Amino acid sequence: MKENLAPATANAADRLAVLQVLRAVAAMMVVWHHAIKAYALTTPDFALNLIHSLFAPAWFREGLGSGVDIFFVISGFIMVHGAGAYLDGRRRPQEFLLRRLQRIFPPYWIVSGLFVALIWGQSHGRSPELGAFRLVTSFFLFPSATAGGDISPVLGVGWTLSYEIYFYILFFLALVAGGRRYPVVLAATLGGIWAVAAAVGNLSAPGRFLADPVALEFLYGAGIALLLRHRQHPAAPVAGFAVAMVVMFAGSWLHVSGAISDQARVIYRGMPAALFVYTALARSQRSATVPGGLKRFWIRVGNASYSLYLTHILVIYYLAPPLARALIVRGLIAHADLAIFLSVLVSLLVGFAFHHAIEKPLQPGRLKRPDQGFDKGKRNQAAERA
């Protein structure tokens, strides 16, 4: 039981539980963001007469997209938090990279295959997204451009996974080349590649991918892990959450109004995302950040967050609309926000189902639930799997 754990182990378990809650928050932000877009920007015909969403303002809608930045910060934290097993020789760096690839690709391939099948059926095989180059690069998350010029795979949300894979590779190389100095090697490599790519200005898809400073957000999470490792009782007032959200949405408003560019995302989204994550993790050492019952629910959402992230676009644009149409026709939905809520709810249910039926059986190892506690000798291994 948790109360029997040594203090260090209890802190590790608390932090891992908070990480899952943070993942849940980030995933739900992204799902809500896309659900609003579905009924505010690309409103289907059957929903044209609905009362407009209260959350349709672009600054709010786009601000919710900051869930992606929270994910990036969390990933950076987890890599450094779980690095001890590789530094002391208990595990090989090659195992790290293999496990991360095994975790990412199989569920991604399944959902991408479903998405490609839907596009094929709608376009009768004539969509430009169905070309051999686009399909191969998409399925292996190699940067390539859509017909509209965006750098993303066919399954659009996969653009974040391309950056995850990129960061995993650099982290692996830093472990191999840098040993215990891997944080310096990692920061220098990631920052150096970004600086060179930005200076060269290569307009190819890989060039634009590498020149996007959003990848630097992983370093925020890495820095948080290093900071918390050396500070036993870090200061983290609860106001940090409010400050982070205010800055995040204020930055979104400035971006939407044209005052700041996409290149500033690492500042106006990445920094408040880092503050949000730091506050939650630091406070986990001092007090329960989330009440027990609610915490268990959010941990479950966090456990399923990858499945939820992968599947929600298919739900919002393909699975939920027929249900929303039926309810609208019967007069049971008159407000766009009810249709949005329905999309989010169905996305959550499908995410849970996909996680338990497909994602978990495909994983090379099972992460012990954070609310069950961790054996002291296994907590670094569990952190790496998170």
Image: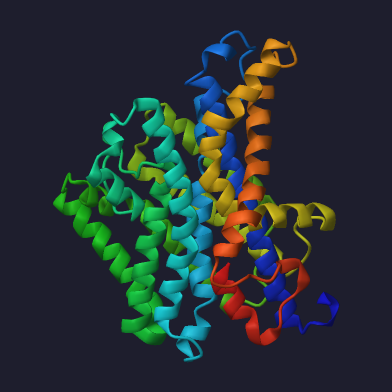
Residue 235, quarter of the rendered image? bottom right
Residue situated furthest top in the rendering: 49
Q: How many marks?
A: 0
Residue 191: % across, % down = 30, 63
Name the residue located 20 percent from the left edge and 55 percent from the top edge. 197
Is 93 above or below relative to 99?
A: below
Name the residue located 57 percent from the left edge and 35 percent from the top edge. 315
- Colour scheme in the image? rainbow
Between 242 and 64, which is closer to the camera in this rendering?
64
Is 145 above or below relative to 355?
A: above
Name the residue located 51 percent from the left edge and 44 percent from the top edge. 66
Between 355 and 211, which is closer to the camera in this rendering?
355
Q: Is residue 65 visible?
A: yes
Is 60 above or below relative to 94?
A: above
Between 77 and 42, which is closer to the camera in this rendering?
42
Q: Is residue 50 left or right of residue 314?
A: right
Residue 49: % across, % down = 60, 8
Q: Is residue 13 left or right of residue 273?
A: right
Q: Is residue 274 left or right of residue 323?
A: left
Q: Quadrant of the N terminus?
A: bottom right
Residue 292: % across, % down = 83, 58
Residue 319, quarter of the rendered image? top right
Q: Is residue 336 visible?
A: no
Between 175 and 214, which is closer to the camera in this rendering?
175
Name the residue located 25 percent from the left edge and 62 percent from the top edge. 193
Residue 228: % across, % down = 59, 73
Q: Quadrant of the C terminus?
A: bottom right
